[in-house]
């Protein structure tokens, strides 16, 4: 039996939160400690994530004292797939789901087409989603303009404290 985890890692979670924060920032540059404090994140770990986002050319960094981090391009030009792959690596299948080891087209397993289709659908959705849309949804959630379960608001309130 294969157990598959499809949720993002903590690094990707931090990256998404930081990118949303930067997309919503009303100033040119934001320091890592400010982002960490506002998002309720560890500044040490956040800096590592921001370094990866900088390497992926999604974020620009400038040295202190007036430096900080900013998006490398408009939020509408950054896809969720780019953010996820910056932290997780390519989402393309490399291992066989049933047999382990490399996935070889000449020895396709019974789940290959279904699994590849599912990954393709997820990749397509992440490519279609932009950071701009994610930041807008975050603002709407903050203003309680979406009908979401109460536990989402409770989690958000803990982060905002």
Image (cartoon, helix red, strand yellow):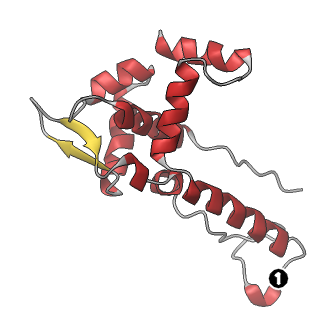
Q: Residue at horizontal 52%, vertical 40%? A: 134
Give above or below for 23 relative to 120.
above
Outermost bottom residue: 106
Front-most of residues 86 and 139: 139
Q: What x and y, as percent, mark residue 147?
A: 71, 23
Q: What x and y, as percent, mark residue 62?
A: 16, 42
Outermost top residue: 161
Query: Which quarter of the figure has residue 100?
Result: bottom right
Q: What x and y, as percent, mark residue 79?
A: 48, 54
Q: Residue at horizontal 41%, vertical 39%? A: 19
Outermost front residue: 145
Q: Does residue 115 appear to the left or right of 26 in the view shown?
A: right
Q: What x and y, as percent, mark residue 65?
A: 9, 29
Q: Secondary structure at mark 1?
A: loop
Q: Does residue 40 appear to the left or right of 101 in the view shown?
A: left
Q: Residue at horizontal 52%, vertical 29%? A: 138
Front-most of residues 74 and 44: 74
10 Å neighbourhood of mark 1: few (<14), some, or many (≥20)? few
Outermost left residue: 65
Give above or below for 58 relative to 34.
below
Q: Quadrant of the N terminus?
A: bottom right
> Can you identify the residue that label 1 sits on?
108
Q: Residue at horizontal 49%, vertical 34%? A: 136
Give above or below for 149 relative to 85.
above
Front-most of residues 125 and 49: 125
């Amino acid at each position: 039996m294969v157990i598959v985890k499809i949720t993002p890692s903590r690094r990707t979670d931090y990256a998404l939160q930081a990118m949303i924060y930067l997309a919503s920032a009303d100033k040119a540059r934001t320091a890592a400690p400010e982002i960490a404090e506002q998002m309720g994140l560890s500044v040490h770990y956040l800096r590592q994530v921001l370094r990866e986002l900088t390497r992926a050319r999604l974020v620009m960094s400038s040295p202190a004292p007036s430096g900080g981090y900013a998006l490398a391009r408009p939020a509408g030009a950054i896809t969720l797939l780019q953010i996820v792959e910056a932290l997780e690596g390519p989402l393309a299948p490399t291992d066989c789901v049933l047999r382990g080891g490399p996935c070889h087209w000449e020895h396709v397993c019974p789940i290959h087409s279904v699994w590849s289709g599912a990954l393709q659908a997820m990749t397509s959705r992440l490519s279609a989603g932009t950071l701009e849309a994610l930041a807008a949804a975050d603002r709407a959630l903050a203003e309680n303009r979406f009908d979401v379960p109460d536990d989402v608001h409770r989690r958000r309130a803990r982060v905002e404290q």
